[in-house]
Image: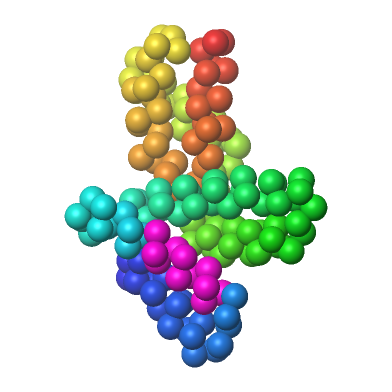
Amino acid sequence: MSLKDRIQDDMKNAMRAKEKERLGAIRLILAAIKQREVDERIELNDSQVFGVLEKMLKQRRESSAQFQNAGRDDLAAQENFEIDLIQSYLPAPLAEADLDALVADAIAATGAQSVRDMGKVMALIKDQAQGRADMAAVSARVKARFGD
């Protein structure tokens, strides 16, 4: 079963269980997936759905922080609920040691020597870490490996 099918099944289950908040959040996820499919005129595979979910996760984290800074705990709680739901569809995050090994392997495989070669390294890592690691943090790790 594809990830998109799993999300659709969860939507049906939330409807049957009358879980209003969960249903609304799942509909947001499906709307984002559908929007990308319509925009690009393609059927998304699981890795592309992971990309959509990661983007939504990043947006929710930023919104939650802004709501908390503004003293709107009710809205921050809604964003945090959506964050938890989105994370439930993503694979387990990579451990620190696994991430370091992945970075080292990518650097060795591409023969990267400096920060100028970072694009090659990140392209290789992105395929393997999609949905399992924050790519901004991975980018910072790669830069640190090259010593800026």
For residue 119, which quarter of the picture?
top left
Residue 70 can be seen, yes or no: yes
Q: Looking at the picture, tell me which residue is in the foreground, 82 or 115.
A: 82
Residue 27 is one of the magenta-drawn residues: yes
Is the magenta region chiefly helix, strand or loop? helix
Residue 56: where, in percent of width, then height?
49, 52
Give the colouring mode of the picture.
rainbow
Residue 79: where, in percent of width, then height?
63, 59
Q: Provide the residue span drawn in magenta.
A: 22-32
- Residue at image position (50%, 27%) is 139
Residue 101 can be seen, yes or no: no
Q: Looking at the picture, tell me which residue is in the foreground, 29 or 132.
A: 29
Q: Quadrant of the N terminus?
A: bottom left
- Residue at image position (33%, 58%) is 35
- Residue at image position (48%, 49%) is 54
Residue 114: where, in percent of width, then height?
44, 9
